[in-house]
Amino acid sequence: MLGLHHPGHSPLHRSPAGVKLLTLLAVSTVVFFLEDLRILAGGLLLAGSLYAVAGIPWRTAVRQSTAVVPVTLLFMAAQWVLVSWHAAAAIGLRIAVVVLLANLVTLTTPTSDMITAVERALGPLRRFGLRPERVGLAIALTIRFVPVIAEQARLVRQAQRARGVRFSLAFLTPLLVRTLRMADGLGEALDARGWESSAQ
Amino acid sequence: MIELSGVRHRYQDREVLGGIDLRLTERRIGVVGLNGSGKSTFARLLNGLLIPSAGTVTVDGLDTRRDGPKVRRRVGFVFQDPDVQIVMPTVAEDVAFGLRGLPKPEVNAKVKAALAEYGLSGYEDHAAHLLSGGQKQMLAMASITVLNPSTIVFDEPTTLLDLRNRQRIADRIKTMPQDAIVISHDLDLLADFDRVLVIHEGKIVADCLPEAAIEKYVAIAETT
């Protein structure tokens, strides 16, 4: 769900964010109880065809979904070794269906609409001390800063390579320092942009 | 008007700013100084991002110690690195971030106008992290000016930019309707400002027109 909105006017774009998120939750839950590979494969086809309905270019769909391929393969390998090829295929198809649908929700929904829907859904928890707007902000910041931190990681790796280090876990230390420094700056920026006044 | 009275600021045992009494009323004010001179601390005191260890900073009579949120609505702040200032994933959403609570049509109209003003029309749904450095700084400025502050503090706004983008930002700063207080090493940018302060080792050592202030700053740089 870390992709970005792809503007459009399809029925999926026009559907309310809350409806899409609830549908995603319900479908994901059902998919994880399905065992029949034919039904799961049908689900995959259906999820893929929804991209055509939404007018999302296939390149965008592939680009959005490839990040989870290594982890999915890891899960499948573990299932194959520990259980059976059937279990491996099932887990692969389940993850593929859910990731495709989740990305579709992201691509057809502006982040701000998604955050508003989450905040509205969490509204009743306000009486227990939860601040829904803070949860919404956390979601927005996660989506915003994953590519920024990935870029920082790339720069740190480049700097290490320039000094003759091929690969070292030591790259985590400067990355952590940069990330913490960025977090400090972000806190200041939120203050400067008046976040506290709307959050309190 | 921003007024600093008897302002001192310490980080633990180290005093980084001391004995500052100023009234900032001009439309364009520059602040120069060597690295570590206290410029960024000074900038952060102006809108209450930092509270002085001693003394008071007031904006139109509002004390930054007591009225932080109100002060920050009057005094915007543009950071050196726009990557930490942009908090939403897409361009339009980032400009709209500070407008929460307003009716959606009003938000859309303000966002559209701000993006047009800063040359970002057509980038509404563009991922913020994919903008160029100059566009990110323009977005950071649009996100602040849309809140309509009366003064904007810029902390080294052109440091990370190439010549073309530096010129764009400089032109925006010169023509925008808000008052501007600009912390910068870019002496050309400050050349036609109304007033320039030189900070050295935590003290204001010159407070005059740009030419004399820059002369003083160059002299400090050559002798330190």
Image (tube, rainbow, N blue to C red):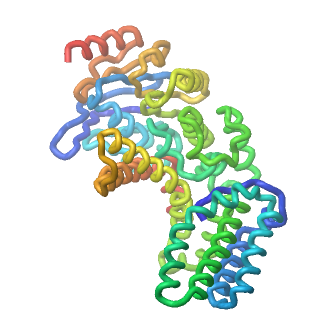
- In-front residue for pair A30/B209: A30
Residue B206 appears in which quarter of the rendering? top left
Q: Position of residue B33 (x, y in %)?
A: 31, 23
Horizontal relation, residue B130 to residue A105: left or right: left
Horizontal relation, residue B144 to residue B9: left or right: right
- In-front residue for pair B30/A158: A158
Q: Is residue B67 visible?
A: no
Q: Position of residue B171 (x, y in %)?
A: 58, 21
- The residue located at (51%, 25%) in the rendering is B162
Work out which quarter of the rendered image holds the C terminus of chain B and state it.
top left
Q: Is residue B6 above or below residue B130?
A: above
Q: Is residue B90 above or below residue A84?
A: above
Q: Is residue B108 above or below residue A30?
A: above
Q: Is residue A115 above or below residue B109?
A: below
- The residue located at (37%, 46%) in the rendering is A156
Q: Position of residue A71 (x, y in %)?
A: 51, 70
Horizontal relation, residue A76 to residue A108: left or right: left
Q: Position of residue B2 (x, y in %)?
A: 43, 32
- Label count reads 0
Q: Is residue B59 visible?
A: yes
- The residue located at (74%, 58%) in the rendering is A58
